[in-house]
Image (spheres, grey):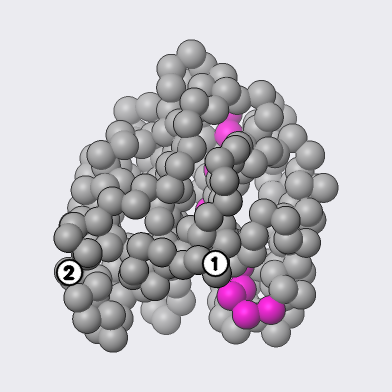
Amino acid sequence: MDASSTVISSNIRFSTTDDGLHSWENRCQLLAQILLSHRPAIVCTQEGREPQLRELAHLLSPLKLVANGRPWIRERMYPCIFVDPTVVEVFENGDFWLSETPQVPGSVSFDSAFPRLCSWAHVRLHGQKFLVASTHLDHVMSETRNKQAAVLVAQLKLLLAPGEKVLLTGDFNDGPTSAARSIIQTALTDLIDPWKKPEESSHHPFSGECPAGSRIDWILLPSDLKVEDIFLDKTNEQGKWPSDHFPVVCRFKA
């Protein structure tokens, strides 16, 4: 793969009228505009229920939502994968839940505040095969996140096909020095965090800053990929933000 590719991970914030200026209908077009401006091959999102995600899929055209066969549960929020079909070929996709019964839709374990899951897809990008994953861990307890991380890596290892490499994205609700990160990288030893900049918060309460926060949104890549750039996109429209998380943008090539 000699062409550059861009992958984005973005917690899009669930739709609620409590957000006022930043309610979904006021910011969805801005979010789509920002994501598309990077000409991404892959966009991985977190949060959002089905109607919100269907609307985003329309706004992100020509990107395609990868959700074949998903048994949508009305009240659940889903991580999602969107791809540029001109450069990404999708072979198979699915979800598993970060619980003791990963194949049971909506299942919850480990005292998680909500059911959490991972969306995955087997893809080919510029001649290389990847297992792409988008996930979202519990936002309350570190021990819950640790157990969810263990389920995450166990299921990804079962899905990993010969010749594939894992590309893992998500809102992990934990910083890069956390136990959850250690669990992931101990099990998936080829994954690296390409972030080399000073640490900063990727979550912000629609303010553009959170001095006490940490970088809880990650993109983890195979170690043999050459990363050209990775950064948080802090674009806003006169104080209107596309989400309460900054999108993480990573451009790389083999």
- The residue lying at 30 percent from left, 46 percent from top is 35
Three-letter amino acid code of the residue under disc 2: Asn
Residue that badge 2 annotates? 26
Residue 108, x across and y down, in percent:
64, 79
In the picture, residue 219 is in which quadrant?
top right
Determine if the magenta segment contains residue 179. Answer: no
Mark 1 or mark 2: whose residue is earlier in sequence: 2
In-image side of 41 versus 215 (left or right):
left
Real-space Cα distance between discs 1 and 2?
Answer: 25 Å
What kind of secondary structure does the magenta stretch mostly adopt?
strand
Q: Which mark is residue 85?
A: none
Q: Nearer the viewer, residue 35 or 201?
A: 201
- Residue 241: name its quadrant: bottom left
Q: Which residues are magenta?
A: 127-141
Q: Rate crowding at label 2 as few (under 14), some (14 to 19) or many (20 or more) other CA atoms within 10 Å.
A: some
**Residue visible at 36% across and 63% down?**
208
The amino acid type, in three-letter code, at marker 1 is: Gly
Residue bearing mark 1: 213
Decide: is 51 above or below 178. Answer: below
Q: Is residue 127 visible?
A: no
Give the residue at x 69% y 58%.
Answer: 152
**Residue 224 visible from this viewpoint:** yes
Residue 157 spot, x, y in % from top left: 75, 46
Quarter containing the C terminus: top right
Q: Position of residue 84 (x, y in %)?
A: 34, 36
